[in-house]
Image: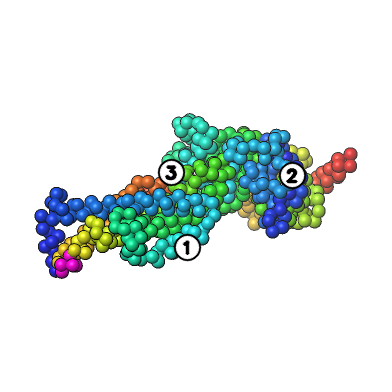
Amino acid sequence: MITFDDVVKVYPGGSTAVDHLSIELPTGKMTVLVGPSGCGKTTSLRMINRMVTPTSGRVLIDGQDVASQDEALLRRGIGYVIQHAGLFPHRTVLDNVATVPMLLGRTRREARKAALELLERVGLSEDFAKRYPAQLSGGQQQRVGVARALAADPPVMLMDEPFSAVDPVVREQLHREFLRLQQDLGKTIAMVTHDIDEAIKLGDMVAVFRQGGHLAQFGTPQQLLEEPADEFVAEFVGRDRGLRSLSFDTAAKVPVRPVAEAADLVLDDAGRPEGWRTVGGTTAATGGVFTVSDTLRLVTDLAISSPAGIAVRVGPDGKADGIVRHHDLVDYLAARREDRAAESRA
Amino acid sequence: MNFSYLLDPEHWDPDATGGFPQLLLAHLGYSALALLIGLVIALPVGLYIGHTGRGSFIAINAGNAGRALPTLGLLMLMVTLLGLGLLPVLIALTVLVVPPILTTTYAGMRALDHGVVDAAKGMGMRPWQVLTRVEFPMALPVIMSGIRSALLQVVATATVAAAVGLGGLGRLLIDGLSVNDYSRVLAGAIVVAVLAVALDLLLALTQRWIVSPGLSGRAVARTRRATTT
């Protein structure tokens, strides 16, 4: 657990970067610090590994004040990933990843062996080991950056806009891989981003900062979307937050009707959806189907976009096993909202 | 004017006093000694200023002031103050080599990617490790360019040693001029020029060897070749 205890940072000249911050980042979870530029999120992150010293207040890791620990030793125990990766250009990929284990006194052989395993873990083949950073794409560099931070298996990781320097397609891919990695590893992670979508997608907890280093809200992504603390948070999380909050529920509870009710649905011999019959007699593409483990957001999207106003559910075998009409969906969402309101009153 | 002095085998006899081998050796000696002293002074100072960011005005002003001093004038001043001998020559030549090494070392350190240095600190390197394992190797290509420029200058300028009675290839110029033997002057000029170019090549090879392929662009060129063929 990382604890900020009434932390203040005032820079010489009087500008306040962090204003009385008190939050707890839970162990084994990913906490995302998000906000507009100049809101103090990076300053706060850098206080955890003492790259920045607070003007007052304390930062603790598992109850231990970081200020009481040797700077270099503290940092070797905390993974550190930065924007553009910050790889050492004069060292090979393998030696970049082996840096912290070597600092911790392991032999070159051991460190390189561990580094090779980590490269594989972040999806880079052995061929990359002997390359230099200049020979890698931005996405590959960032993967090496993550592998380097993980090399000594630190319980805590700090990530400062780790995915902002790559294009959207690569970022998407890195997100997926990172979530999978975190599921295996369960590190206590603090990550900074200015991208609220990224924060909501990756964070178990999200801390929204506003200008002047104030914490506007700290909660789960769902709480931010559904119960924004104020106008600032509501605006920051965006206008389609209602739709986005549907990403947190699966389609498991959505009631379906029998497939036969969808008269225009074309099925193949095995009962798998093929498309929609159109007025002209041709078949239009299905536009997608959902399973019980997909999100409510996908179901909503399918119901709105399909020509028949119907989302088709399929079973594990790919056969259509139910349909959702969009008025059924609206009823379900209304009932869901009332249930939740009742829950929060109770 | 002709090449007769240069091509005369007698002047290439290693035992001949005033022959090329002995003059060359003395010339190399003055140059190397001055370069070494210059490195010992300029490199640590440049690295310190670059690493800490403190006293950058020293690097800039010392560089400019050093360049503005005429070496021959300084040499004469030193001889007046200290008398004849090796010391005044070494001082004058050291003052010549310090500015290019100091300014390029400082410039190389300042131009480093800030993110990389931040990562090095954030990963738990101590200041000394950041300097020796990250900053210095990364700045090395620029530092080497300063050392090479200092070497070229000192080899060309070490001829002034002859003006105050010492040896070196300057002897050929000074003595040749005094007896109107232009063939000898030409021979001295050619040998100095060839020596400077040869030493620069030697340093270029050293640079290839000590600078990481990740920095020199050779590694990138290698992948480009591998992927295009």
Task: Give the Cα distance between marks 2 and 1.
Answer: 43 Å
Residue A86 versus residue A116: which sits nearer the camera?
A: A86
Q: Residue at x 47, y 43 (%)?
A: B133
Q: Residue at x 25, y 54 (%)?
A: B27
To which quarter of the image does residue A6 belong?
top right
Looking at the rendered structure, the secondary structure element under dot 1 is helix
* Residue stretch rendered in magenta on the structure: B176-180
> Mark 2 belongs to which amino acid?
Gly
Residue bearing the label numbered 2: A57
The chain containing the residue under callout 3 comes to A
Point out residue A252 in the picture as x, y percentages from the top left corner. Answer: 74, 38
Q: Chain of mark 1?
A: B
Can the viewer see residue B16?
yes
Residue drawn at x 21%, y 54% as measured from the top left: B23
Dot 3 alpha-carbon crowd within 10 angstroms: few under 14, some 14 to 19, many 20 or more:
many
| Circle 1 residues within 10 Å: few <14, some 14–19, many ≥20 | few
Left or right side of B195 for B5: left
Label 3 SS: loop
The numbered dot on residue A131 is 3
B67 over A330 or under it: above or below: below
Q: Nearer the viewer, residue B223 or A255?
A: B223
The residue where tag 1 is placed is: B61
Of B12 and A346, the residue lying toward us: B12
Amino acid type assigned to the residue bearing label 1 in the image:
Asn
Q: CA distance from mark 3 to mark 1?
A: 41 Å
